Image (tube, grey):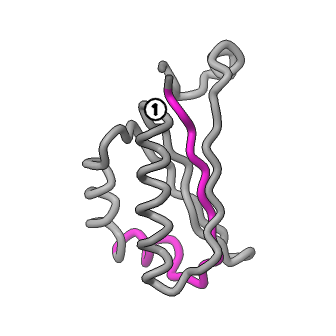
Amino acid sequence: MAKLLQVDFEFSGPFGKELSSALAGLAESINNEPGMIWKIWTESENDQLGGGIYLFEDQASAQTYLDMHTARLQQMGINKVRGKIFDINQPLTSINEGPVNQ
């Protein structure tokens, strides 16, 4: 059963186009992560936050990615990473046309 992963962390930038340019290669590599279906990149310059919403095929894939991503962010000096894995209520999500068909 598909799982949604929500991650956020304190981030001082860059944001917007500058972030897009800097991390395009990383974004492309995330497509190759086992079990990853899609990612929505999130950012808030006002709140100094970065993160993402991910859809994974299963719990194990989501947890493996969260562990790896947390370690990667910590190597970049980001120590407080918040990650949560959620079940998806498919009937309600379908009513609101959520991009989840799992």
- Image coordinates of residue 27 in percent, x first then y, are 34, 59
Q: Secondary structure at mark 1?
A: loop
- Image coordinates of residue 83 in percent, x first then y, are 62, 56
Residue in the image at 35% along x and 38% along y: 35
| Direction from residue 28 to residue 54 in the image, left or right | right
Residue in the image at 63% along x and 27% along y: 88
Residue in the image at 50% along x and 81% along y: 14
Give neighbour class at mark 1: few <14, some 14-19, many 20+ (Cα, 10 Å): some
The quadrant holding residue 21 is bottom left
Q: Which residues are magenta?
A: 2-21
Q: Nearer the viewer, residue 51 or 63?
A: 63
- Image coordinates of residue 29 in percent, x first then y, are 26, 58
Above or below, 79 against 71 in this view is: below
How many marks the image carries: the answer is 1
Residue in the image at 66% along x and 22% along y: 93
Above or below, 72 against 59 in this view is: below
The quadrant holding residue 79 is bottom right
Tag 1 residue: 58
| Direction from residue 68 to residue 7 in the image, left or right | right
- Image coordinates of residue 84 in percent, x first then y, are 64, 50
82 within the magenta span:
no
Q: Nearer the viewer, residue 96 or 71?
A: 71
Q: Nearer the viewer, residue 52 or 16?
A: 52
Which residue type carries mark 1?
Asp
Q: Nearer the viewer, residue 87 or 13?
A: 87
